[in-house]
Image (cartoon, rainbow, N blue to C red):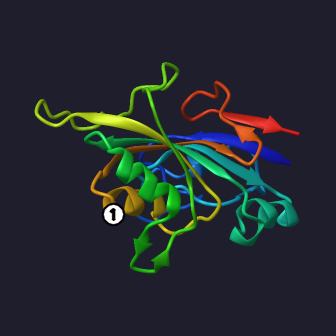
Amino acid sequence: MLVALNKPFGVLCQFTDEAGRRTLADFVPYKGVYAAGRLDHDSEGLLLLTDDGRLQHRLADPKHKQPKTYLVQVEGVPTEEAIERLRRGVALNDGPTLPAGVEAVAEPEWLWPRDPPVRYRKTVPDSWLRIVLREGRNRQVRRMTAAVGFPTLRLVREAVGGYRLDGLGVGETRLLR
């Protein structure tokens, strides 16, 4: 079984939490599935879950280099130089990142409002990037955009490999083949 979930902001990528925070159990009606990869508590979007250990390994293990596509709202308007640095890879405290696909994009019309909303500042513009990674370090996209001077305000994963959100509503699941 393979399940797509549009993980809401503020949900933990686990099924239990002793502190009473929202978890996958609040949204996933299927038993015996586990997340194939992770999305941080403060990230949103596509999360794949499966009951097939081999498939989970193929989707989540960095050695298989499944492309993961993110829509990233950043503070400020990145320069071409900053975008090119992201494309080439940036030095982080745990080593350099692999080259990434990066392009400036308009805010997607299909994107749902975040709850709670991203902070709005009249004097600081924001903009959107689409970033495609083939590795998956802890909070990597956030650390990459901060390293080039444009902190991440919102992070939405729209695809993993060939699997996409494709109109899946916030908190909704879909069985995949």
- Residue 58: image quadrant is bottom right
- Whether 107 is drawn above or below 126: the answer is above
Q: Residue at x 49, y 68 (%)?
A: 138
Q: Residue furthest top?
A: 109
* Front residue of this view, candidates 60 and 77: 77
As drawn, is 135 to the left or to the right of 92? right
Q: Is residue 26 above or below residue 140?
A: above
The answer to which of 14 and 165 lies nearer the viewer is 165
Q: Position of residue 106 (x, y in %)?
A: 43, 26
| Label 1 residue SS | helix
Does residue 135 appear left or right of residue 118 in this picture?
right
- Residue at the outermost bottom position: 94
Provide residue 103's location: percent of width, then percent of height: 50, 40
Image mark count: 1
Q: Classify residue 155 as left or right of residue 52.
A: left
Q: Which residue is painted at 54% across and 45% down in the image?
A: 70
Residue for badge 1: 147
Residue 83, image x, y percentages? 42, 49
